Image (cartoon, grey):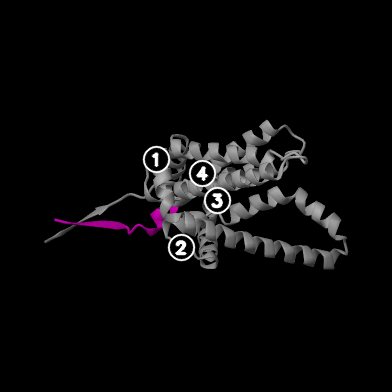
Amino acid sequence: MQEVTRDIPARTEGELRLHAMVRAVLSPGIWFVLAAQLLLMFALQWRVPEDAAPLVSTLAIFLTAAALMLFFYLQAGAFQALSQGREALPVSEVIKAGKAVVAAFVWLILKAGLLFAVAMNVLVLVALLLTGSNLEGLTQALTAYFGPMTGVLAFIFVYWLPLVFVQREFRLLPGLKASLRIARARLSHSTFLVLMVLVPALVAGFLPTDSPFLLHALASVAAGIMGWIAYIYCVDALRQRQQPAPDKIPV
């Protein structure tokens, strides 16, 4: 048996970016997840009246928790399905793919949230010691810049979730370290990711808190679709790094 070597041309940066944008915009599954994101935003905006019966308060908490878990499930399914295929993502694939990874994904997000909370507490403690500020004033200052700070973190670790699902690396610290190495190696290609991840987060983060809810919702959807474009781009870039140069076909 002979082996015929067929070279598979690597996609250029322009092709990676164009494929990511087209695939995201044409994927009903992604728009379905964004609709769930809006639903969750509405759920979190609603406040139970102070004079409401205990049963109403309990039901509201249950419905909010259910909406949050549904959102996590759909996110996990979309992340998983997008990392496995290359075509537009249907809603059915999002729902089907979520079953296998939702538990590991939620546990990973909980660990990441705990690590973030610990880091923020350490940052606040160090800032208090260095500046002598009072806790209330410092907390207000950090709250004002919370959105932009999370945007910067999302950009720094932009390859983290793509790596988690492409390489099935659900360990927190090894995944974060590996994503930083990849980001550093691809630093010369980061302009597109700045536009897709960092800029929308900064714009949304600096919106006045008293802006109309519709404006915040539109900013969230815009940042969301651009974030999915960035995710698909990173998935394709990771696959290209893993792909061997020649493809040998037995004949």
* Residue matched to label 1: 92
C-alpha gap between disc 1 and disc 2: 25 Å
Amino acid tagged 2: Glu
Residue 99: x %, y % from top left: 42, 51
The Cα atoms of the two marked residues, 4 and 1, are separated by: 18 Å
Identify the element where label 2 is drawn. loop
Q: CA distance from mark 2 to mark 4?
A: 19 Å
Q: Amino acid at mark 4?
A: Trp
Q: State the CA–CA distance, disc 2 to disc 3.
A: 23 Å
Dot 1 falls on a residue whose secondary structure is helix
Give whichever of discs 2 and 3 has the lower sequence position. 2
In the rendered image, which residue does mark 2 sit on?
169
Task: Please report whichever mark, 3 or 1, sits nearer to the chain's N-terminal start.
Answer: 1
Camera-side residue: 32 or 193? 32
Q: Earlier in the sequence, mark 1 or mark 2?
A: 1
Write down the residue under mark 4.
228
Name the front one of labels 4 and 1: 1
Mark 2 or 4, nearer chain start:
2
